[in-house]
Amino acid sequence: TLVGSRLETVIASESLPPDMQFSAYRVFVTKEEVIYLLDNLNNNRRILCINPAESLEPVVVGQIPTEGRSFLTDLFVTDGGTIYVAAGDQRKVLAFHPSSPTFTEVLKCPDGLEPAALLVQDRSLYVSMVTPQVNGEPWTGKVYEYLLPPELQLPGFPGGIG
């Protein structure tokens, strides 16, 4: 361990009401220390936001609409508040802004590939895509760059990407 460092609990799922308990598969923290969690507990497929400056109570800022089985694998939040989510089983990258309940499909992965990890830098969306394990064969993957349009129009968010 690092000298002088310590591990502190920020929030414990079991201390929350049952409808707000979570299984944080991925965590993203903004410069302002706002915490975003991908919650796959009980197939919730939702994004929770915790702003310690306001409260340690999580708020649902997005719920992925899906039919059937789906698993969220990663998220990235831009400085402007746009949230990108990798929905592995759907082979899609979705984007939304918390001011709107509507998700926009940004990218559909090529056949045989699923999004595993995301990063947005300027107008580039970097996506790690993997070929799922079949018959004991190892996972394989590549990193792709997708140039985002100058204005990614998200419902309820006139400012475009950012």
Image (cartoon, grey):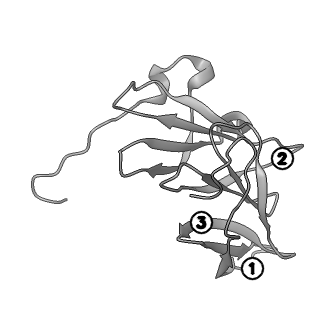
Q: Which circle marks residue 114 in the picture?
A: none
Residue 67 is left or right of residue 158, and the answer is right
Q: Nearer the viewer, residue 10 or 160?
A: 160
- In the rendering, at what x and y percent does residue 56 appear? 40, 26
Q: Which secondary structure, mark 3?
A: strand
Q: Which residue is mark 1?
A: 137
Give the residue drawn at x 77%, y 42%.
102
Mark 2 and mark 3: Cα distance apart in space: 21 Å
Mark 1 and mark 2: Cα distance apart in space: 23 Å
Instruction: State which tag comes first along the sequence, 3 or 1.
Output: 3
Mark 3 and mark 1: Cα distance apart in space: 24 Å
Residue 20 is left or right of residue 53, and the answer is right
Give the residue drawn at x 62%, y 39%.
98
Q: Which circle marks residue 69 in the picture?
A: 2
Q: Which circle marks residue 118 in the picture?
A: 3
**Circle 2: residue type:** Arg
Q: Residue at the far front: name it.
A: 158
**Circle 3: residue type:** Leu
Q: Which secondary structure, mark 2?
A: loop
- In the rendering, at what x and y percent does residue 22 appear? 57, 33
Crowd class of label 3 (few under 14; some 14 to 19; many from 20; radius 10 Å): many
- In the rendering, at what x and y percent does residue 51 appear? 41, 34
Query: Mark 1 or mark 2, which is nearer to you?
Result: 2
Query: Mark 3 or mark 1, which is nearer to you?
Result: 3
Residue 43 is left or right of residue 161, and the answer is right
- In the rendering, at what x and y percent does residue 109 appear? 80, 71
